[in-house]
Image (cartoon, rainbow, N blue to C red):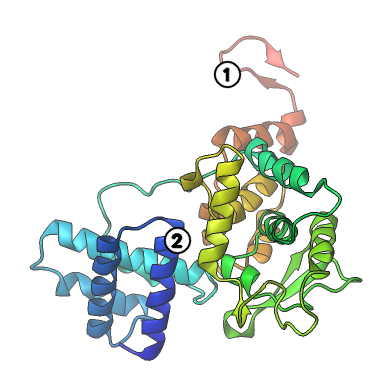
Amino acid sequence: MGQDDAALIDRFLEMMAAERGASRNTLIAYRTDLMGAGAILGGLAQATKDAIGTLAAQWANLAASSVARKASALRAFYAFLEEEGLRGDNPSIALPRPTRGRSLPKILSTAEVDRFFALIAERLAVAHPARQDLRLAALIELLYGSGLRATELVSLPRRALAADRPFLILKGKGARERLVPISDRARAAVSAWLAHVPADSPWLFPSGKSHLSRIRLYQLVKALAAAAGIAPERVSPHVLRHAFATHLLEGGADLRALQMMLGHADIGTTQIYTHVDSRRLVELVNQRHPLAAMPHHRVDGDAPAS
């Protein structure tokens, strides 16, 4: 297993601990499974789908529960790499499929997100808002308003947002660039926060000798959820990124535009990530498709509908 694999596994397990609350035993098992697979494949980071497909034969003599656990660890690992923009594909589709279906992502309603911003607005509605509340406002506005990944957000350079430019240009794997629109609200929140950022800091969200950590961001988001009366286990930076995409899609946004804003190399990832209620899709077809304006018979066979 290469040095890159070790660093990526560390980042993945950090996410599992902070965002999903994985237990110590789960983290140890995942690390063991990932390192074992990496030893077989000669590395995980660059492994191809064909190489991943050979693992099934390597695991042939193992119990079904062990195979399911190993496959689950690798699936979660490669989904993390794809979501973070570290890979443009997900080779884990070649792994043995578990019997249970894929669970739907956690979803926050617009009303629940409104509670976050109402609480932040209440904290800022004083003569001299606390420095940590100004920072929190900037973080949440960028997370929900632009759909940034946690890593992208905490590592933003101090001068990432230009006063005359309502968007960010972020670079991902392979020097691929993507444009991320920044709302007027987010720009105002960042501007207020910048007054409290040391002029010599290279980071927009400095902390010690570096920038704010992913784990600290998770803690801040969960604390905000608890204060807003929402179960903290339902909320994370990733859930807010998902809410950004879901609520835009529900509002009629184009899936390709979302793919670009989220930084997904494969639109299939966007389709899974931006889960939308099926009733909303039916409503879109019935109201916006050209055939919707034509006379048609009702499904129950009664009179034609206009």
Classify the position of the C terminus by image quarter: top right
In the structure shown, which secondary structural element does the residue marked by tag 1 occupy?
A: loop
Disc on the earlier residue, 2 or 1: 2
The furthest residue to the left: 61
Q: Residue at x 29, y 74 (%)?
A: 34
Quarter residue 184 falls in: bottom right
Kind of residue sitting beneath label 2: Ala
Q: Is residue 127 left or right of residue 101?
A: right
Residue corresponding to mark 2: 18
Q: Is residue 300 left or right of residue 56?
A: right
Q: Residue at x 72, y 74 (%)?
A: 204
- Coordinates of residue 58 in the picture (x, y in percent): 16, 75
Q: Is residue 219 left or right of residue 246?
A: left
Kind of residue sitting beneath label 1: Val
Is residue 186 among the parts visible in the rendering? yes
Instruction: State the CA–CA distance, disc 2 to disc 1.
Output: 49 Å
Relative to 235, does residue 281 appear above or below in the rendering? Answer: above
Mark 1 neighbour density, 10 Å: few (under 14) some (14–19) many (20 or more)? few
Mark 2 neighbour density, 10 Å: few (under 14) some (14–19) many (20 or more)? some
Residue 299 is labelled as 1
Relative to 147, does residue 280 appear above or below in the rendering? Answer: above
Instruction: Judge by depth and name the residue closer to the eye, 120 or 260.
Output: 120
Relative to 197, does residue 40 appear above or below in the rendering? Answer: below
The furthest residue to the right: 164
